[in-house]
Amino acid sequence: MSYLKENLESVKEQIKASCEKSKRDPEDVTLIAVSKTKSEDMIKEIYDCGVRDFGENYVQELSQKMEDLPDDIRWHMIGHLQTNKIKYIIDKVYMIHSVDTLHLAEAIGKEAVKRGKVVKCLLEVNVALEDTKFGFNSDNIEENFEKIKNIEGIDVWGLMTSAPYVENPEENRQYFVQLRALMVDLKDKGLYNKEKFLLSMGMTNDYNVAVEEGADFVRIGTAIFGARNYN
Ligand SMILES: *Cc1c(COP(=O)(O)O)cnc(C)c1O
């Protein structure tokens, strides 16, 4: 078995174990293989193992891969998105997880309407209030969620967060609990009306904890593809 397949199997096993621990159905957790900086050959190998959800951060890289790789891949845009680049990905992207300003949301909506599309989105929340991260915070998410929900061309499904890099994933449990609580609060206040909402949380270092706290999407790069080399 190739090492990529082995990595994938081990991640799936761990997701299953976390589901058992928290009495969740593993079917309810979608694994997004985060393939930024990784080759199309590597993606193809994971694709051949049955994975159809892939996450990318950079528009140019994403649009190239969208062009080259099979059409039934669901591409998740998870990186910071500039408004002038929306047009390059909007036709093929399955979901944008990283809607981090009202301005960006308006621009996505405008581009979507122009093309007669509706784009599934999650709003990014910087729960841990890290200076280096984009996103709304717990004080302004309500106001922005309400506005963005009403933008034509956008279909809001829930929230996304990237927790801090920590050695001990238990330290991030609080942030996953907080993200869920924010979403429950939005629902309770009548600002979200679908029966089901989606939480995108958990990366290589903390996805076990995120699954235990209710992640619907985990975004896993390193544990599947190995460390990234940005040179
Ligand atoms: C790169 C990235 C990931 C994957 O990170 P790993 O630690 O390699 O699993 C997940 N989410 C976002 C937003 C990322 O930028």
Image (cartoon, rainbow, N blue to C red):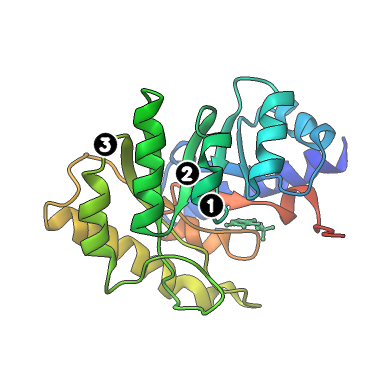
Badge number at residue 96 = 2
- Alpha-carbon neighbours of circle 1 within 10 Å: few (<14), some, or many (≥20)? many
Query: What's under tag 2, amino acid-wise?
Result: Ile
Picture coordinates of residue 224, whole percent (x, y): 74, 48
Picture coordinates of residue 145, whole percent (x, y): 26, 56
Q: Secondary structure at mark 2?
A: strand
- Residues at marks 1 and 3 touching, judged by CB atoms closer than 8 Å: no
Callout in the foreground (1, 2): 1
Q: Nearer the viewer, residue 143 or 10?
A: 143
Q: Is residue 118 visible?
A: no
- Alpha-carbon neighbours of circle 2 within 10 Å: few (<14), some, or many (≥20)? many
Q: Nearer the viewer, residue 202 or 111?
A: 111
The quarter of the rendered structure image containing the C terminus is bottom right
Sequence-earlier tag: 1 or 3? 1
- Would residue 51 be found to the left or right of residue 127 on screen? right
Picture coordinates of residue 139, whole percent (x, y): 27, 74
Q: Residue at x 47, y 38 (%)?
A: 95
Picture coordinates of residue 76, whole percent (x, y): 55, 40
What residue does disc 3 label? 152
Sequence-earlier tag: 1 or 2? 1
